[in-house]
Amino acid sequence: MKYHDKQIPIGDIKAETFLSLIENRPYCDITATGHFNRNTSEEIIEMDEYKNILNVKLSRDGLMRHLPEALFFKESSLLHLREEAYHKELKRIKKEKRALQAFFRPFDTILFENNLLLEECINDCSENIDEKLIQFYFGIDLEKEKNPLIRQIAPFVLKASEIRGDFDKIQKLLEVLFKRKVEILFVEKSALITVQFIIHIPQLTTEKYKERMTLLGEFFAFFSEYFLPFDMNYDYQIKDKNQVFRLGENLILDYNTQI
């Protein structure tokens, strides 16, 4: 198993962590054999499945081992006993001990299952954590979002406070997102500032131009809500300033022709 690009021996991995990676795992039945074994063996000593139950033997202490031994046995009961009586009493104690271990085994299993469910929950949360945070705090469901540009920019909402109004960062972010040159111009009209985004995309057909403008309309409506100052209007255009005029070619007003 790898962790931070380092290979980790399976014996050094907590049993819950290992079992949480098993898809559609069955219910676990735990046998704790004692912490003594941990020094000489892996935590999972053996594991087998029977009737949709995963029997797991662990080299760790069970609940009984964490309770004071005096609750169950008295050392004084073995004192001053002769050899025959001593072995008889010791045999009785071992039998009671096995019965107590069987009694506490369901509790060990319940505790282990709870830890295992917590581990699985942590695994689930660690996958696509940004999507879960965005949906929880901002109500943005990326699974239902159809606009690919919005899906790509949405994770940056978590860093919106560091980006909002910083147009150097915004320009670099948009150029990485669009994989195109982006110009940002500021136009002042009636005491209001309009920020104008010009995206340079060459050689679009009329259909592709309309399709891209629709996507950008949805995108910038989303983008302005989180990344632009509230007192700014916005506008966006797609330009192809480098296209050379050729007779018979389709031209799109204000895209590859100048107004």
Image: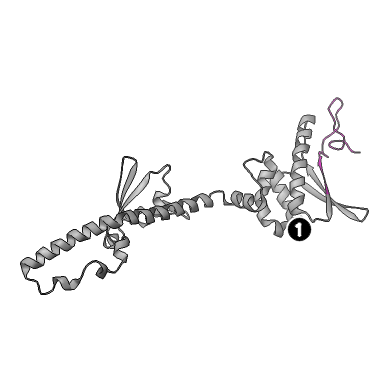
Mark 1 is surrounded, within 10 Å at the Cα level, by few (under 14), some (14 to 19) or many (20 or more) other residues, namely few
The image quadrant that residue 91 belongs to is bottom left
Q: Where is residue 11 in the image (x, y as percent from the top left)?
A: 34, 55
Q: Is residue 221 above or below residue 160?
A: above
Asked if residue 45 lies left or right of residue 16, the reply is left
The image quadrant that residue 230 belongs to is bottom right
Magenta stretch: residue 247 in it?
yes
Q: Position of residue 30 (x, y in %)?
A: 32, 52
Magenta stretch: residue 237 in it?
yes
User: 47 and 73: which one is in front?
Assistant: 73
Q: Position of residue 63 (x, y in %)?
A: 32, 61
| Dominant SS type (magenta) | loop
> How was this image coloured?
one colour
Residue at 76% across / 56% down in the picture?
A: 168
Magenta region: 234-259
- Number of numbered discs present? 1
Per the image, the residue denoted by label 1 is: 166
Q: Position of residue 59 (x, y in %)?
A: 30, 57
Asked if residue 253 lies left or right of residue 213, the reply is right
User: 64 and 142: which one is in front?
Assistant: 64
User: 195 and 63: which one is in front?
Assistant: 63
Type of amino acid at the residue the image marks with label 1: Asp
Visible residue check, residue 9? no
Q: Which residue lies furthest to the top in this view?
A: 248
Visible residue check, residue 143? yes
User: 244 and 160: which one is in front?
Assistant: 160
What kind of element bears circle 1?
loop
Q: Which residue lies furthest to the right in this view?
A: 190
| Quadrant in the picture for the C terminus | top right
